[in-house]
Amino acid sequence: MSGTLYLCATPIGNRGDITERVKETLAAVDLIAAEDTRHSRGLLDYYGIDRPLTSYHEHNKYEKAEELLGLLLDGKNIALITDAGTPSISDPGEVLVRRCHESGVTVTSLPGACALITALSVSGFPSRRFVFEGFLPQEARERKAVLASLASERRTVILYEAPHRLLKTLKLLEEVLGARRICICRELTKVHEEAVWTTLPEAIVYWTENEPRGEYVLVLEGLSEEEAAAEGAARWSGISLTEHLQQYLDEGLDKKEAMKRMAEDRGTSRREIYQGLLEEEKG
C-alpha cells in the first residue's frame, strides 16, 4: 500500500498557532518536505520534533515531486510544509498534490494558519464572496491582464506582496481601481501586527514617506452594485445594443445567454435589453 501525503499548516508568525494534530503528524511521518529546510529546522527544534527533512520549493517542484511520489508509492508517509501557512496555497505544493491524485496516493490536509483568511477576517470587507490572486505576476502582459480583471471585480480581492514591491503595486492598483478602499495587513500574528484601513491614494502617500517592512496582505473592497452598474454603462455606451449582442453571438453564445451577459455588463435587466434591441431593429 502507498503512504499518505499530509499537508501540514504551520504558523504564519506566532509559534503558538499550530495544532496538536500537526505536531503529532510531523513527529510521526517518515519524511518532511519543506520549502526552506533551514527555516523549518528551527521551527521543528522549537517543538522538539526530530524527523528527516528534504527541500521542496519553486525551483525543484517538478523533479522533486516525482522523487517524493516514488517514496509515497513505496509506502512512506510524508508531511509537506511551507515556510508559513497552509501548503499548496500560493506555493509549489499544488504540483505534488496533483501528482499524488493522478497516481492514487492519499492526500489529507491538516488545517491551520492561513494569511489570506486571517487578513480577510480582520478587514471588515464582505467575506461571503472573495477572490485570491496571490502575488501579481512578474510578466508584464500577465500582470496587465490580472489588473484589468480586477477593475470590474465585485468580490473582495486579496493579494500578497513583498515589502520591496509594495509601493509599486499600490500605484498600479490605483491606476486601475482609483480611490478604492483597502485594508493593508502586515506581520500578521506577530508582535508588530498591523491592519491599516485606508484608500489606495492615502496608502501611497503613507508608504512613500515610510519604508515598508514585513510581509503584506492587501484586502481590496470590491465594486458596489451602483459602481458596477455605472462602470458597465460607461464601458458599453460607445456601442449599440445590436453590436454588443453580436460580439457575444460571435463568441458562440446563444441569444438568451448573450442577452443575460449584456444585462450584467450594462447593469440593467434582460427585459430592458430585449426592449432596447427591438427599438434598434425598428429604428
Image (cartoon, helix red, strand yellow):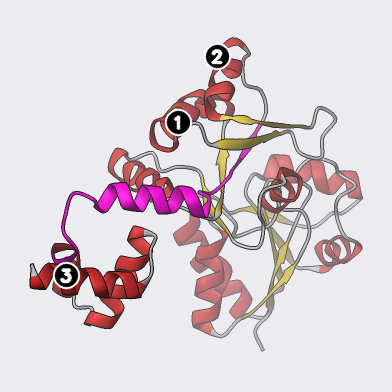
Q: Which of the image's four quarters has the N terminus?
A: bottom right
Q: Residue at x 35, y 53 (%)?
A: 232
Label 1 packing within 10 angstroms: few (<14), some (14-19), many (20+): some
Q: Are marks 2 and 1 in contact (CB under 8 Å)?
A: no
Displayed quadrant of residue 105: bottom right
Type of amino acid at the residue the image marks with label 3: Glu
245 vs 53: above or below: below
Type of amino acid at the residue the image marks with label 2: Thr
Labelled disc at residue 174 = 1
> Residue 232 magenta-drawn?
yes
Type of amino acid at the residue the image marks with label 1: Glu
257 vs 147: above or below: below
Query: What are the residue bounds of the magenta stretch?
Result: 215-242
Mark 3 to mark 1: distance in Å? 39 Å
Labelled disc at residue 208 = 2
**Which one is earlier in the sequence, the residue at label 2 or at label 1?**
1
Front residue of 96 and 128: 128
> To which residue does mark 3 refer?
279
**Which one is earlier in the sequence, the residue at label 2 or at label 3?**
2
> Residue 192 magenta-drawn?
no
Mark 2 to mark 1: distance in Å? 14 Å
Q: Does residue 167 appear left or right of residue 14 in this picture?
A: left
User: Which structural element holds mark 3?
Assistant: helix
Label 3 packing within 10 angstroms: few (<14), some (14-19), many (20+): few
Q: Are marks 3 and 1 in contact (CB under 8 Å)?
A: no
Task: Give the image location of residue 122, x and y in percent.
Answer: 76, 45
Mark 2 or 1: in front is: 1
Q: Which of the image's four quarters has the C terminus?
A: bottom left
Label 2 packing within 10 angstroms: few (<14), some (14-19), many (20+): few
